[in-house]
Image (tube, rainbow, N blue to C red):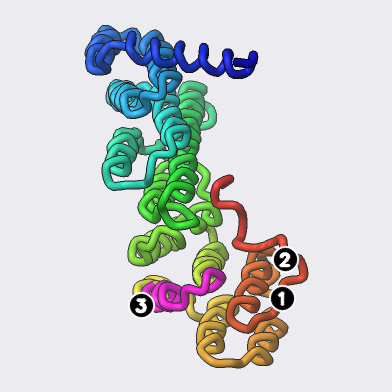
Amino acid sequence: MNKAGRRWKLKSMSRERTRRELPPVQEHIDKLKKVVEEGNYYGALQMYKSISARYVTAQRFSEALDILFSGSCLELEHGLVNCGADLALLFVDTLVKSKSPCNDETLDRIRCMFKLFPRVPVPPHLVDVSDDDDVHNLQESLGEARSRVENLTSFLRAAIKWSAEFGGPSTGYPELHAMLADYLYTECPELDMVRISRHFVRAEDPEKFASTLINFMGRCYPGEDDLAIARAVLMYLSMGNMKDANFIMDEVKKQAEAKHPEFSESDLIQFTSYLLETLQRDALPLFNMLRVRYKSCIDREPLLNELLDEIAQIFYGVQRKNPMEGMFGDIFKV
């Protein structure tokens, strides 16, 4: 046997010995639960990481996942978002290492961890700037909210990528997109409707998206409402999804016109309505004419032109100038 073969054999024997020496996983779970309940949250975090790593090394992935899931839930239940999120992210990393398939059992665990991430109302931004305590408390609350959103985003973004690679749709499991979109909308101090919309159009829940857009219209700055609606419709169309694009437009119009009479008068909304009609027939010249006629309102956001290029490719076979661009951003990096 050559040196490489001996090294492989020794490594294999070491791994097998480790597998035999590791105790039943429930012993660790019970022990670590006591550590958490005693208030040693960060000590418990390090123990969860080191012990689960030993099971991963021994390729006892199921037991490593049990430890990480238990730890994430316990830390989150005790309000330790950073600790809980660390373990939730390690849970997904272990799913990838073990090549675990995207199935109901694992998705149930992801749902459980997601529901334990806190939802804390952010105080109004209108504060007495002469009161140092008032300003400090607001800044602290906003900082904590941003941290919660970043932690949750890292966890679910990793879960979306895992689901895409191991049995789910190529863009990720729809419910995971819905979870992330909803949390970003309700918990993020600075709303990023582009980012939120990217996930909603993959969530297969146009009803929820429509109600979110209606809510946004009541809280956004003037000029942001029609842009959010048009962007949502064009995102659906850029995926070839005419059904949900029409649903969003019809539902928003139905609910919005009573509260916002000026809504349908927007040039951008008129363009979007005409676009939906045009795409139902083979009318590339009309499509191009609309882009020219409504150029000034389309140019309000560069993303709209990018989406229209994708729509032209999908519906009319028009090749993009840069074939490497498309799909309005990498969903695994947003």
Q: Residue at x 41, y 51 (%)?
A: 167
Q: Is 164 within the magenta?
A: no
Q: CA distance from mark 1 to mark 3?
A: 35 Å
Q: Position of residue 193 (x, y in %)?
A: 52, 55
Q: How many marks?
A: 3
Task: Tell me the kind of residue under disc 1.
Answer: Gln
Give the label, 2 or 3, closer to the camera. 2
Q: Residue furthest front?
A: 1
Between 237 and 268, the one nearer to me in the picture: 237
Q: Position of residue 116 (x, y in %)?
A: 30, 33
Residue at 29%, 24% in the rendered image? 70
Going from N to C along the chain, the mark reached first, 1 or 3, is 3
Residue, disc 1: 319
Q: Quadrant of the N terminus?
A: top right
The residue under label 3 is 254
Is 223 displayed left or right of 182 in the figure?
A: right
